[in-house]
Image (cartoon, helix red, strand yellow):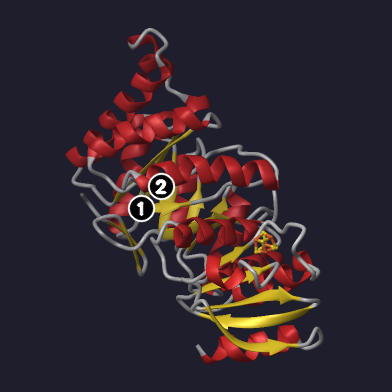
């Protein structure tokens, strides 16, 4: 499979799966944009995308570029001059839908991207399929999308440009999975996402099903969990998906559903522990369980955990009781022990 290069990040060709997100405010507010980029970076985002809807936003993007080192993607629709502006302003990659840029303008964009040695994501959405392709396949959206992307990649290859990432998105999960399985055969790195996935809970479920199904098939090289929420939530969700599937090192967190044996405020302590460990740069499994009857035994493979015990807690390591802790200071003692790992 081919590999794309976005500044210091490789996409595809065996590179680690990278995490992307997108700022959700106008880039004209430069300070707020930089603040959001910093928050995304701290949460573990590898690549940040910014929408450039007009020439003023290109100017603002140029300033943002000088104040952050994270790889930046300029998101462009329709106007090839914005694509060229974004590249010249320092974008490490641009995202375009080639279907809405005339051929002579597309050639100028390719020429500029080559000159600046940056990547291009060819993004096609289920809702924006080129009509000529739909007509050719009697309205079959799947066949039309695949054929259009095949033609686009050939068009770029004819111009000696293969620093490409492909994406096909739909708000329909089955369609997203089927389309990505089909375009995986084209041999280019894939950007995965379920578009317009909805608010936090529904969006997390849809993204986990769509992205997770494809990753389990070995398909996908960079992911964006699209949510109507703070973009930082997108990054934590992407990390959770990758860590859960063993595709990224990090903290695996488990907690029990709680039952009548539980004698502690499980939800509170589990939330506190999770909020602490989610930021750690450690490859460990952490468990918070409601009771000592089943807790340590059920989590033998956890590196560290706590379980409720008659209103107090036991701290366990690798399925064995390590020490007992009274109700107070449990979080502090847990933090001390987890920091030793
Ligand atoms: S660990 Fe204990 S409290 Fe939690 S579900 Fe199992 S038996 Fe119930």
Q: Residue furthest front?
A: 293
In depth, the one of 266 and 60 nearer the eye is 266
In depth, the one of 238 and 159 nearer the eye is 238
**Distance of label 2 from label 1 (alpha carbons):** 6 Å
Q: Vertical placement of 306 versus 95: above or below?
A: below
Q: Badge 1: how crowded within 10 Å, few (<14), some, or many (20+)?
A: many
Q: Which mark is residue 221?
A: 1
Asked whether residue 125 appears in the rendered view, the answer is no
The residue that appears at 51% across and 32% down in the rendered structure is 173
Q: Secondary structure at mark 2?
A: strand
Q: Give residue 41's position: percent from left, percent from top.
A: 55, 70
The quarter of the picture where residue 36 lies is bottom right
Q: Secondary structure at mark 1?
A: loop
In the image, the residue with mark 1 has its CB under 8 Å from the nearest atom of ligand 1: no
* Mark 2 / mark 1, whichever is N-terminal: 2
The residue that appears at 30% across and 24% down in the rendered structure is 147
Q: Which mark is residue 155?
A: none
Asked if marks 2 and 1 touch (Cβ < 8 Å), the reply is: yes
Q: Which mark is residue 191?
A: 2
The residue that appears at 58% across and 69% down in the rendered structure is 43
| Side of 17 where 278 appears, left or right | right
The quarter of the picture where residue 109 lies is top left
| Side of 303 where 14 appears, left or right | left
In the image, the residue with mark 2 has its CB under 8 Å from the nearest atom of ligand 1: no
């Amino acid at each position: 499979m081919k590999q794309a290069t976005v500044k210091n990040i490789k996409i595809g060709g065996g590179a680690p799966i990278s995490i992307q997100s997108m700022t959700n405010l106008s880039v004209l507010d430069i300070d707020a944009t930089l603040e959001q980029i910093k928050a995304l970076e701290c949460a573990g985002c590898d690549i940040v995308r910014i929408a450039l809807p007009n020439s003023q936003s290109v100017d603002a993007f140029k300033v943002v570029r000088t104040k952050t080192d994270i790889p930046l993607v300029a998101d462009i629709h329709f106007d090839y001059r914005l694509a060229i502006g974004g590249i010249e302003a320092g974008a490490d990659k641009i995202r375009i839908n080639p279907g809405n840029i005339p051929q002579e303008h597309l050639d100028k964009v390719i020429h500029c991207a080559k000159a600046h040695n940056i990547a291009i994501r060819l993004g096609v959405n289920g809702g924006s399929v080129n009509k000529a392709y739909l007509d050719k396949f009697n309205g079959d959206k799947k066949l039309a999308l695949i054929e259009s992307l095949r033609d686009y990649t050939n068009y770029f290859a004819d111009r000696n440009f293969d620093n490409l990432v492909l994406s096909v998105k739909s708000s329909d999960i089955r369609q997203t999975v089927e389309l990505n399985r089909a375009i995986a055969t084209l041999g280019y790195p894939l950007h995965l996402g379920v578009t317009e996935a909805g608010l936090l809970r529904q969006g997390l479920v849809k993204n986990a099903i769509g992205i997770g199904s494809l990753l389990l098939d070995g398909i996908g090289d960079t992911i964006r969990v699209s949510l109507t929420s703070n973009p930082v939530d997108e990054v934590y969700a992407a990390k959770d998906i990758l860590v859960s599937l063993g595709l990224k090192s990090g903290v695996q967190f488990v907690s029990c559903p709680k039952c009548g044996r539980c004698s502690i405020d499980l939800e509170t302590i589990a939330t506190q522990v999770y909020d602490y460990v989610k930021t750690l740069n450690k490859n460990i499994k952490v468990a918070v369980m409601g009771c000592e009857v089943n807790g340590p035994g059920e989590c033998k493979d956890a590196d560290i955990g706590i379980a409720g015990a008659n209103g107090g807690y036991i701290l366990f390591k690798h399925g064995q009781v390590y020490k007992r802790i009274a109700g107070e200071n449990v979080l502090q003692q847990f933090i001390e022990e987890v920091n030793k790992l």
